[in-house]
Image (spheres, helix red, strand yellow):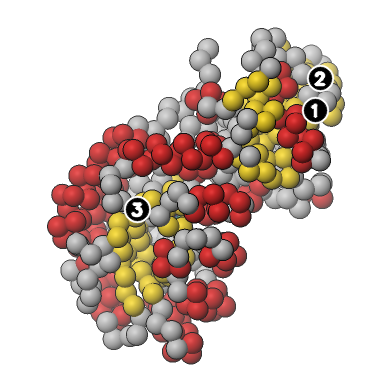
Amino acid sequence: MTEHPTVAAFGRSEGKLTVGGVPVDRLADRAGSTPYFAYDRQLLTDRIAQLRAALPEGLNLSYAVKANPMPAVVQHLSGLVDSFDVASSAEMLVALDTTVPANRISFAGPGKTDTELRQAVAAGVTIEMESENEADRLVRIGELLGVRPRVAVRVNPDFALKGSGMRMGGGPQQFGVDAERVPALLKRLGDTDLEFLGFHVFAGSQNLRAESLIDAQRHTVDLVLRLAEDAATPVRYVNLGGGFGIPYTDKDQPLDLAAVGDNLSELLTGRLRPALPEARVVVELGRYIVGESGVYVTRVVDRKESRGKTFLVVDGGLHHQLAASGNFGQVIRRNYPLAVGTGFGAEPVETVSVVGSLCTPLDLLGDNVTLPRADVGDLIVIFQAGAYGLTASPTAFLSHPAAAEMLV
Ligand SMILES: *Cc1c(COP(=O)(O)O)cnc(C)c1O
């Protein structure tokens, strides 16, 4: 069997998996405890290089911080991407601590409070408005602070991204202003002291089908060009969204990035540049940038037999890495790639289930996986932990200790 591409990208040394060149057991000693998350700095750098090679020159690459907001990760990426997309004021502050200037940070998300809007206006980031109400509040806040808010309209498109793991556009949505309501909003904005920059369209997430992404990008450009006709000032910002997926399970085929890049190149030079010459055109990616570069490492604390089945019970679980248990929006539970980090590359000899330490049957990390022999003290590595890991998990559930995080 060929190795899963995400697994194959990691290093190995003397029968152990390495992250950033350091064996996982050494990292456990360095962290002082297990479980831990480790993110491979070089894999992050390599991923950005792959994206730069595939995407057209002049297209801006934005990192969606919510995928992994660890400050060290955001700092590392700040030297590699063009801009950041944040979805809370805490994420905004992490982004502002980097060298990326405020005018390259955009703030999206429904339900922004007045406090968050004030922070965003004061900081000078671009606020992606999700409703007419948000626009009205921004006008007041701008007057109050004596600062002209920089705004874009997040548009809920009149189409959906087919085959997405998570749909975030099309039909009724809490995200964005319905496309058909945008012309009226633009008219109102013309009478306010908001600095209108452009449009943001985000149709969905976790898509592995290039043809679906290409289709959505074409529709997005059609929509933006149509809406731009109603803008009072030239459009200076077009955020085309992202949605690039990663292969979580053995059944998933990696995205054909070259095909997506070629289409973006055509759209940029053939349509957007001629019609909107002043626009900074952006794609925003979260999991595609960080997801495959991280692992969750947890130690076997018990090995038990129950009616013919072997369980490896580990010191971690869904409270740190919910997604691997299949409870983070998945329809069908499938195992994430998983390995014995302290017996890496050894012959698989047995079928076991890897379960976490929480007192609930939901805490299943690997269901009937074929692995090399692992005993108490061995380290189990769960891949695809770089995005929506620790911060997307119910860390307080059952009050177990926290997991460490390291960028290596
Ligand atoms: C979550 C989110 C992203 C990132 O999604 P990924 O699937 O991680 O790439 C990008 N843009 C917006 C607006 C988001 O809400």
Q: Residue at x 31, y 70 (%)?
A: 197
For label 1, the crowd category at 10 Å Cα-Cα, with few meaning under 14, some 14 to 19 and many 20 or more, is: many
Q: Amino acid at mark 1?
A: Val
Q: Secondary structure at mark 1?
A: strand
Q: Amino acid at mark 3?
A: Asn
What residue does disc 2 label? 375
Q: Residue at x 61, y 51 (%)?
A: 72
Residue 201 seen by the camera = yes
What residue does disc 1 label? 300
Decide which of tag 2 and tag 1 comes sooner along the chain: 1
- In front of the other: 269 or 18: 18
For label 3, the crowd category at 10 Å Cα-Cα, with few meaning under 14, some 14 to 19 and many 20 or more, is: some
- x then y, percent, for residue 273: 19, 56
Cα separation, mark 2 vs mark 1, equals: 7 Å
What residue does disc 3 label? 60
Ligand 1 lies under 8 Å from the Cβ of mark 1? no
Q: Which dot, 1 or 3, sits closer to the camera?
A: 3
Decide which of tag 3 and tag 2 comes sooner along the chain: 3
Placement of the C terminus among the 4 image quadrants: top right
Answer whether labels 2 and 1 touch (C-beta < 8 Å): yes
- x then y, percent, for residue 384: 57, 35
